[in-house]
Image (cartoon, rainbow, N blue to C red):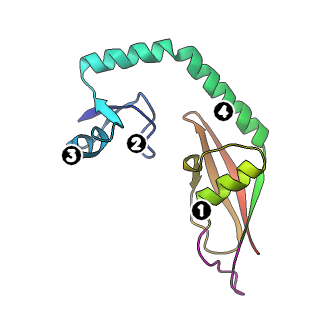
């Protein structure tokens, strides 16, 4: 079953993408939640027209995302957490904590745009990816330290 996404869906695609999904996932989850519409000819034409009209606006959004990525540069985020003597942390370091630290440093990035490749279990340095735009991704270093 082909559907047209009405908003970004992590792991599936971005807004206005035509993606192929299993029929049950499309009919029972994506369409009822308003996340997607069926990809018939009239909807494809409508989306193509909307994309064409919004092309200049999309270029501005991409340019803003690239500017934000350049401003971030080689930023290292430091997260303080409780840890045992062996270096194992209690609890977890979440995307929400990283987004809060970035907000404190002046970068307004939604927590849903912060993707951790691996969940930190020990003190040390990890890599997080900021999904700023579908064509602009920025990797930052996350250092987990003991409080």
User: What residue is shown with label 1?
Assistant: 94
Separation of disc 2 and disc 3 at Cα? Answer: 15 Å
Q: Which mark is residue 24?
A: 3
Nearest to N terminus: mark 1 or mark 2: 2
Nearest to N terminus: mark 4 or mark 2: 2
In the picture, measured across the screen, residue 19 lies left or right of residue 124, that is: left
Judge depth for marks 2 and 3 and give the one in front. Answer: 3
Rendered-image quadrant of the N terminus? top left
Q: Quadrant of residue 144?
A: bottom right
Q: Is residue 93 above or below residue 116?
A: below
In the picture, measured across the screen, residue 116 lies left or right of residue 79, that is: left
Separation of disc 1 and disc 3 at Cα? Answer: 31 Å
User: What residue is shown with label 2?
Assistant: 12
In the picture, measured across the screen, residue 3 lies left or right of residue 108, that is: left
Separation of disc 1 and disc 2 at Cα? Answer: 22 Å
Q: Which mark is residue 45?
A: none
Nearest to N terminus: mark 1 or mark 3: 3
Closer-to-camera residue (73/47):
47
Separation of disc 4 and disc 2 at Cα? Answer: 21 Å
Q: Is residue 87 magenta?
A: yes
Q: Which mark is residue 65?
A: 4
Nearest to N terminus: mark 2 or mark 3: 2
Q: Range of the magenta residues?
A: 81-92
Q: Quadrant of residue 145?
A: bottom right
In the picture, measured across the screen, residue 50 lies left or right of residue 84, that is: left
Q: Is residue 87 above or below residue 41?
A: below
Residue at 76 percent across and 36 percent down: it is 70
């Amino acid at each position: 079953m082909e559907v047209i996404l009405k908003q970004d869906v992590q792991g599936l695609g971005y807004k206005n993408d035509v993606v192929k999904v299993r029929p049950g996932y499309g009919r029972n989850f994506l369409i009822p939640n308003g996340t997607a519409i069926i990809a018939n000819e009239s909807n494809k034409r409508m989306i193509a027209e909307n994309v064409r009209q919004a092309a200049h606006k999309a270029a501005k959004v991409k340019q803003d995302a690239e500017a934000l990525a350049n401003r971030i540069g080689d930023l290292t985020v430091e997260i303080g957490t409780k840890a045992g003597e062996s270096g194992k942390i209690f609890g977890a370091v979440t995307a929400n904590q990283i987004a809060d630290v970035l907000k404190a440093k002046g970068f307004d990035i939604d927590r849903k745009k912060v993707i951790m490749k691996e969940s930190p279990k020990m003190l040390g340095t990890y890599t997080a990816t900021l999904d700023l735009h579908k064509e602009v991704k920025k990797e930052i270093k996350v250092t987990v330290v003991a409080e």
